[in-house]
Image: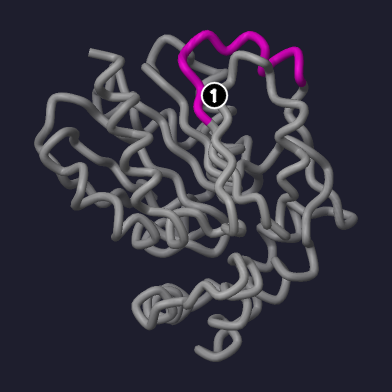
Amino acid sequence: MSLFANIQGTGPETIVLLHGVGGSHAVWADIVPQLATEAGLIAYDLPGHGASLEAESARSPKRMAEAILADLVERGIGRAHLVGHSMGGAIATLIALADPDRFASLTLLAPGGYGEEIDADLLRRFAAAEDPDEIRACLAAMSGPGHIVSDRIVADAMAMRARPGQLKKLREIVATIAKGGRQGVIPADLLAKLTMPVAVAWGVLDSVLPVSQADTLPDRFDLHLVPVAGHMLPDEAPGLIVELLRGIIRNSV
């Protein structure tokens, strides 16, 4: 089965958007319209999620990265800006390492794969959540204090989970990425080989993947700490992400 991607925008640049575990292309709904005149945007449903639920590559971040890269090659995307949130950040990093010449920049939002610590219990709760109140509670726990989870985001999560087999697949993915209550780490010597511009945004109050994991980033990575925010940056700080991407696009022309 081919991967689903929501494609919008008509600008000269291409931006590829990869969501986190339990999400879908819909998590970028506050970001895509603001960039649609400046870039073409490809927002994937990752393997095992939403309209890409049946993709065979939904086994590990590495396999997902291989599938996304193959799809980009098939679409003829020769130069793009790669953006990933949470697990999508780990996948984006693996894609950039596999084919660095294809990507003009890499933007990571509270990325997975940069330290062992992970709130596996909360992710397991989120993967199993099928009631709107439980979904909202999980998303609120992932966000900074006082952040209000919108009805739209809860509705998007409910719609995705309505697909037969979706909850089972989410539980399998979380079991893989948080095996033994820890996550796999991308080796620092590999990260040091990335030569494209790399920007990282991290919520200071992230409880899922602690901001302390940013301490080990290569010095050349451009780190942006987001005060008061937690883990759900596409929802908590969409304006910051838009401005960050606009700056990256401007500097790449």
Q: Quadrant of the C terminus?
A: top left
Q: Residue at x 40, y 74 (%)?
A: 153
User: Relative to residue 25, is residue 122 drawn left or right?
Assistant: right
Q: Quadrant of residue 150?
A: bottom left
User: Relative to residue 118, is residue 10 drawn left or right?
Assistant: left
Vertical side of 6 occupied by 100: above or below: above
Q: Nearer the viewer, residue 162 or 165?
A: 162
Q: Nearer the viewer, residue 142 or 194?
A: 142
**Structural crowding at the residue carrying mark 1, measured as other residues with C-alpha within 10 Å and reported as few (<14), some (14–19) or many (≥20):** few
- Label 1 amino acid? Asp
Horizontal and vertical percent position of residue 137: 61, 82
User: What residue range appears in magenta?
Assistant: 188-199
Vertical side of 231 occupied by 110: above or below: above
User: Relative to residue 150, is residue 193 drawn left or right?
Assistant: right
Q: Secondary structure at mark 1?
A: strand
Point out the residue furthest to the right here: 180
Horizontal and vertical percent position of residue 187: 77, 22
Mark count = 1
Horizontal and vertical percent position of residue 112: 66, 43
Vertical side of 146 occupied by 53: above or below: above
Residue 105 inside the magenta-drawn segment: no
Residue 194 inside the magenta-drawn segment: yes
Q: Quadrant of residue 181?
A: bottom right
Q: Residue at x 19, y 52 (%)?
A: 33
Q: Residue at x 83, y 43 (%)?
A: 116
Vertical side of 182 occupied by 90: above or below: above
- What residue is shown with label 1? 222
